[in-house]
Image (cartoon, rainbow, N blue to C red):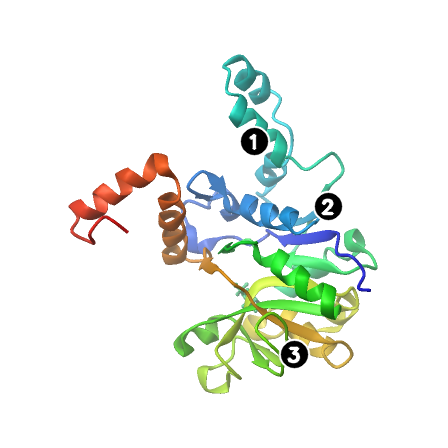
């Protein structure tokens, strides 16, 4: 039986330059999709998948993330005294229990692989999930839970993938698909940000991983790769020589909130799910002549 995955790592040290000036003093992971910060969606997804320990790789100017996952002493009595019991219950439900959240800093921006390596002491010798909060997934169940189902069958390492148009592959890590169904197939190769002509497929690495702890030693030996950064994809490619990697083409939809278009689209689609604001949105769409307003 595969060893249970209890810990999830969230790299949140990035500078968020694509969202300046919004991210000058505020972490990009705190940008909201409707009324929830991006990082909250990733934590919710992890919790749904059975994660009990949440490890955040932060950096300077990211203190607000730690505050977000702590009790807010002024807020709770105020909500209680105003009778806002639903809001209070939601805040309490979402709070990690004492000791369930850990924070460590990536001291230099050396890349995603290096950020993950910074988690090695907190993760220890056990498999872990890795969630990149820029990627937001809308699906039932959440992507990590779908991956856990594959992991229970296969063990080893599991990566969520999705298809993108060929002209977009060079923005992502790309995998080569071997045998097996969408719910769990063999990955035979992977490459970080390939030129379109070198991409082995149009299946990209979607920002959700289940990894074995042997990855840490390999990251430590990893020379710099694409963009001059230490890449997790390169370390995974090395680990593939010793361990199996399974791809899961998940059911659901993703939004790349690392860019403005994906972020705004996510806000739009999530807002349409909220009856209290959907009507106003639909009316505006109609007014602008962008659609029938009945979507
Ligand atoms: C990272 C990974 C890449 C993956 C992508 C998903 O790239 O290195 O393999 O496809 O996230 O968002 P980044 O977005 O940090 O450049």
Q: Position of residue 67 (x, y in %)?
A: 61, 34
Q: Which residue sits at x=41%, y=49%?
A: 20
Q: Which quarter of the frame holds ligand 1?
A: bottom right
Disc 1 designates what residue?
90
| Distance CA(mark 2)–CA(mark 1) | 18 Å
Q: State which quarter of the image contains the N terminus.
A: bottom right
The image quadrant that residue 272 belongs to is top left
Mark 3 neighbour class, 10 Å CA radius: few under 14, some 14 to 19, many 20 or more: some
Q: Position of residue 187 (x, y in %)?
A: 63, 78
Nearest to N terminus: mark 2 or mark 3 = 2
Above or below: residue 272 compared with residue 245 = above
Q: Position of residue 254 (x, y in %)?
A: 47, 59
Residue 86 in view of the camera: yes
Q: Label 3: state its secondary structure.
A: strand
Name the side, left or right, on which 5 lies relative to 286.
right
Q: Label 2: state its secondary structure.
A: loop
Q: Position of residue 200 (x, y in %)?
A: 53, 84
Nearest to N terminus: mark 3 or mark 1 = 1
Q: Which mark is residue 137?
A: none
Disc 2 designates what residue?
52
Above or below: residue 106 compared with residue 182 = above
- Mark 1 residue CB less than 8 A from any atom of ligand 1: no
Disc 3 designates what residue?
186
Q: Which residue sits at x=61%, y=36%?
A: 94
Mark 2 neighbour class, 10 Å CA radius: few under 14, some 14 to 19, many 20 or more: some
The image quadrant that residue 167 belongs to is bottom left
Name the side, left or right, on which 57 lies relative to 294.
right
Above or below: residue 134 compared with residue 63 = below
């Amino acid at each position: 039986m595969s060893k249970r995955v209890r810990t999830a790592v969230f790299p949140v040290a990035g500078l968020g330059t694509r969202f300046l000036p919004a991210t000058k003093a505020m972490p990009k992971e705190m940008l909201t999709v409707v009324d929830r910060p991006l990082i909250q969606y990733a934590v919710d997804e992890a919790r749904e998948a059975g994660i009990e320990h949440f490890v955040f790789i932060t950096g300077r100017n990211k203190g607000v993330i730690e505050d977000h996952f702590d009790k807010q002493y002024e807020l709770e009595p105020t909500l209680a005294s105003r009778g806002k019991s639903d809001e209070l219950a939601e805040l309490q439900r979402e709070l990690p229990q004492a000791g369930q959240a850990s924070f460590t800093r990536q001291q230099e921006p050396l890349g995603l692989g290096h950020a993950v390596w910074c988690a090695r002491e907190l993760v220890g010798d056990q498999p872990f999930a890795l969630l990149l909060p820029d990627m937001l997934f809308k699906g039932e169940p959440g992507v990590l839970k779908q991956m856990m189902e594959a992991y229970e069958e296969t063990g080893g390492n599991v990566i969520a993938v999705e298809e993108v148009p060929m002209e977009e592959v060079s923005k992502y890590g790309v995998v080569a698909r071997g045998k097996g169904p969408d719910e769990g197939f063999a990955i035979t190769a992977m490459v970080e940000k390939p030129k379109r002509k070198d991409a082995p497929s149009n299946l990209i690495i979607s920002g959700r991983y289940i990894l074995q702890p042997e990855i840490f030693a390999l990251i430590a030996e990893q020379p710099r790769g694409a963009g001059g950064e230490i890449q997790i994809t390169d370390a995974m490619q090395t680990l593939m020589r010793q361990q199996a990697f399974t791809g899961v083409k998940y059911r659901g939809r993703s939004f790349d909130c690392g860019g403005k278009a994906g972020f705004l689209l996510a806000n739009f689609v999530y807002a349409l799910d909220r009856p209290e604001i959907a009507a106003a949105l639909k009316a505006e769409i109609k007014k602008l002549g962008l659609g029938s307003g009945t979507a």
